[in-house]
Image (tube, helix red, strand yellow):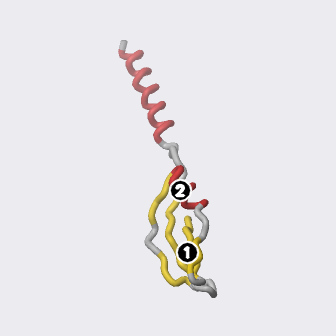
Amino acid sequence: MKKVLTIIIIGLLFVFVSTSCEPDEKCKNCKTVTYDANDNIISQTALVEYCGDELEDKENEPSVIVGGEKTQYECE
């Protein structure tokens, strides 16, 4: 009985360890950066972590140009 219980516990630990180490979603830190007409950085926000669909939305969001200033998300 002890041997069967030991095998079951080892099996459960193996399953837990092998699945817990894999990240479910890809994550990156992103910031909003604003450039002037000469591509000099005017301002930028602090980095914020985005994952999964939210990250994909930020990476695919187009740049916005207002009055010669371009603002876009940059993820690293």
- Residue behind mark 1: 71
Asked whether 52 or 62 is in front, the reply is: 62
What amino acid is labelled 1 in the image? Thr
Rendered view: 1 above or below 54: above
Alpha carbon separation for disc pair 1 and 2: 17 Å
Q: Pointer 1 and pointer 2: residues touching (CB < 8 Å)? A: no
Would you say 68 lies left or right of 7 here? Answer: right
Q: Nearer the viewer, residue 74 or 6?
A: 74
40 sits left or right of 14 in the view: right
Residue situated furthest right in the rendering: 38
Label 1: few (<14), some or many (≥20) within 10 Å?
A: many
Mark 2, residue position: 55
Q: Furthest residue to the front?
A: 67
User: Nearer the observer, disc 1 or disc 2?
Assistant: 1
> Mark 2 falls on what kind of element?
helix
Image quarter of the N terminus = top left
> Where does the image place residue 71, in percent across and percent down from the top left?
55, 74
Label whose residue precedes the other's in the sequence (1 or 2): 2
Residue at 52%, 43% (x, y): give it: 22
The residue drawn where x is 45% and y is 73% is: 45
- Specify the quadrant of the image occupied by residue 59: bottom right
Mark 2 crowd level (few <14, some 14–19, many ≥20, 10 Å Cα): some
Name the residue type under label 2: Leu
Per the image, label 1 sits on a secondary structure element best described as: strand
Q: x and y percent of residue 47 in the render?
A: 46, 68
| Residue drawn where x is 63% and y is 87% of the image | 38
Q: Quadrant of the C terminus?
A: bottom right
Q: Residue furthest left?
A: 2
- Residue 25 horizontal/vertical position (percent): 52, 47
